[in-house]
């Protein structure tokens, strides 16, 4: 089965299938495809890697089958906890050998930000599909290199945008696309939390590539884009820092940023590592509004519009994400909000512009 | 009684009284003072003037006794509706004669923005206390002239900041001052509504001095200052316009603006004339938050903190405002949040900086 799937994917048939005329043969292939399971290795066994592993227990079409870690004790623990065979365990020295492992289809890269590029490219060169945690890379240039590498290797590159599959988020997005809020002219994203341990990698410029913006701020950037359904044409940004010891040079504590859109819509966002109670999206239009709070947290999302609350069952975001990513890879399914490398790159272009706006004080054009 | 009150005020005794040792004589004066009523004329009988007149029906210490209007039919209607004697009715040609009218203590100027300065100075020169609707003037320079004129005339100058007396607002402000939210590092003010009739004075640059910022945007500026309890040191701002026909040159439709404060707090605000559902304040600190929605509308304010909802009886804002302004003038009462000319000027300095930031694209320093 594996070799046949590989053959189909390399031939581009999984994408072609959706536009080909219906035949019994294709129908049989389709049925067979839905039985297939995406066999995933997680690279980076930290707290978020653990969260993804736990979430995947409930997946039907994605299965955790391998690990890549620099810590032997973690590998041992995961082998036991998740029943991972020894032959699917790698470290950062030998993970390139994964190319010879026919039992792994994709690698979920959950290492610190600065390692996303080398690790993703390493995985791509090993011929495996890449799922990379957000932000995809430190900057747009790195993002472009990753896209090129995955394209050259003929593998998928996807970014861990779990909100793109969250039911209430999708309901709000569908209403926006259907014009239910009229002309949407304002988006507000407040993304932040009070960060703890000052020694963690997220506060290390070398590893994180920045501060709150590279972590929680990306949610507001990305949210503005999918909630408004258009791409910004300019960015302005302002930084404030109250604790220069905890937040060293190049590690942003708090940034407010604004984005202008072709329609005349404007987004006003906050990214911070020094306050809690900040997990809010607000979309306002000429005919109505949507409010989400929490908007991107790991738990249940709350959403309401001018029509009332949006009801949908909470499913662990990472469970849905991995199910849907399996369908994208295995069936060529097209998600309503993209999660591919180009989508990740769009956020990185904005991150670059925000940092440039902070540095120069100028309005940065994106066109 | 009037001449004695005038004498006390001119002697500065109403202010001195609070710091003088208790005596029977002062006690008697105090009692007498509380019986006094501030006799007010309204200048400008438009919709907001009518709202104030209606609200004053429930006042015990402020009484509508006169009108100034350019429209004889309005004067007739008000005479009948509010029992105003003919001798207390003026037009814009003869209102300076109000100086010879001992039965009017103060004039509430509710004319278009560009007339606030000449009218307020005219009232001051007639020796009457000035209550001026917000924004106090078109810019800081005008505001300074008004302050100087009122000082020279020995009369009070107050700005119609009704929220400064609103019970839930004051409760939030007291909690902030008491440190209940920890270090308050973020204020968000969303102020806007979809403006109707394109021929109204608010959309006329000559009369309004601008657009949404000169009207609804001032609430977010002012709110940021009283909610955070400090004065901004820098301003940035961005303008977007979707309808250049309705919102002509110099009339802002939508402005996003940010203010930085000495503590490291930042305010992120929206002022718009093209969307409803925008009447929100959000104050966030290291230990808690306050959320107000509606935050400045004429109806009941809703406020909650991390501790739960704030309960307080709704009283028509303008009723409370006029009662409290009477106490300021008659008793020398000091409000928790100032409403004097200096307070109005602080907002105008920021309005000037916002327009300069929009024009230049630069961060405007306020220090």
Image (cartoon, coloured by chain):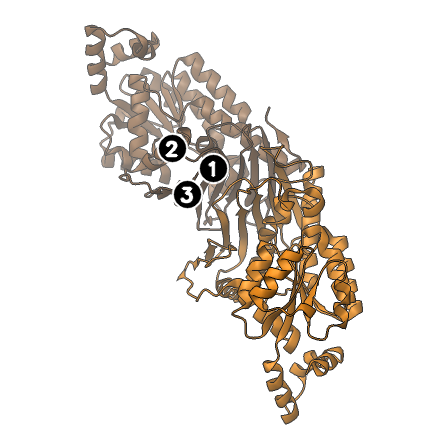
Chain colours: A brown, B orange
Q: Are marks 1 and 2 in contact (CB under 8 Å)?
A: no
Depth check: B343 or A253 in front? B343
Q: Secondary structure at mark 2?
A: helix
Who comes first in sequence, dot 3 or dot 2?
A: 2
Q: Chain of mark 2?
A: A
Badge 1, how many Cα within 10 Å: few under 14, some, many 20+? many
Residue B22 drawn above or below residue B8: below
Residue under label 1, please give it: A285
- Mark sitting on residue A175: 2
Q: Position of residue B216 (x, y in %)?
A: 58, 49
Q: Is residue A265 visible?
A: yes
Look at the picture and state if B153 lies above or below A10: below
The image quadrant that residue B44 belongs to is bottom right
Q: Which residue is mark 3?
A: A291
Q: Is residue A215 visible?
A: no
Judge whether A65 appears above or below A148 on screen: below
The image position of residue B361, as x and y in percent, is 69, 37
């Amino acid at each position: 089965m594996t070799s046949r799937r590989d053959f189909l994917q390399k031939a581009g048939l999984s994408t072609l299938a959706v536009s080909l005329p219906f035949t019994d043969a294709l129908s049989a292939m389709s049925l067979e495809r839905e039985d297939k399971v995406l066999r995933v290795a997680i690279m980076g066994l930290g707290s978020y890697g653990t969260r993804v592993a736990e979430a995947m227990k409930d997946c039907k079409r994605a299965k955790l089958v391998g690990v890549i870690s620099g810590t032997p004790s973690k590998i041992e623990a995961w082998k036991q906890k998740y029943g991972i065979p020894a032959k699917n365990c790698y470290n950062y020295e030998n993970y390139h050998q994964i190319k010879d492992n026919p039992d792994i289809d994709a690698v979920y890269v959950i290492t610190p930000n600065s390692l996303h590029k080398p690790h993703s490219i390493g995985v791509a060169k090993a011929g495996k599909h890449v799922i990379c945690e957000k932000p995809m890379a430190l900057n747009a240039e790195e993002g472009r290199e990753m896209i090129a590498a995955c394209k050259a290797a003929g593998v998928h590159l996807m970014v861990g945008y779990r909100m793109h599959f969250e039911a209430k988020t999708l309901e709000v997005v569908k209403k926006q696309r259907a014009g239910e809020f009229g002309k949407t002219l304002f988006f507000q994203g407040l993304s932040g939390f009070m960060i703890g341990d000052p020694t963690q990698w997220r506060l290390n410029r070398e590893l994180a590539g920045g501060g709150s913006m590279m972590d929680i701020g990306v949610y507001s950037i990305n949210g503005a884009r999918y909630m408004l359904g258009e791409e910004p044409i300019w960015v302005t940004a302002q930084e404030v820092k109250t604790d220069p010891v905890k937040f060293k040079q190049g590690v942003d504590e708090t940034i407010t940023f604004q984005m202008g859109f072709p329609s005349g819509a404007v987004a006003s966002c906050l990214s911070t590592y020094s306050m809690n109670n900040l997990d809010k999206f607000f979309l306002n239009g000429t005919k109505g509004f949507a409010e989400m709070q929490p908007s991107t947290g790991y738990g249940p999302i709350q959403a309401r519009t001018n029509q009332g609350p949006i009801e949908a069952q909470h499913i662990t975001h990472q469970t849905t994400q991995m199910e849907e990513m399996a369908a994208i890879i295995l069936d060529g399914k097209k998600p309503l909000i993209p999660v591919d490398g180009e989508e990740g790159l769009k956020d990185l272009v904005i991150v670059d512009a925000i940092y440039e706006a902070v540095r120069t004080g100028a309005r940065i054009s994106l066109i």
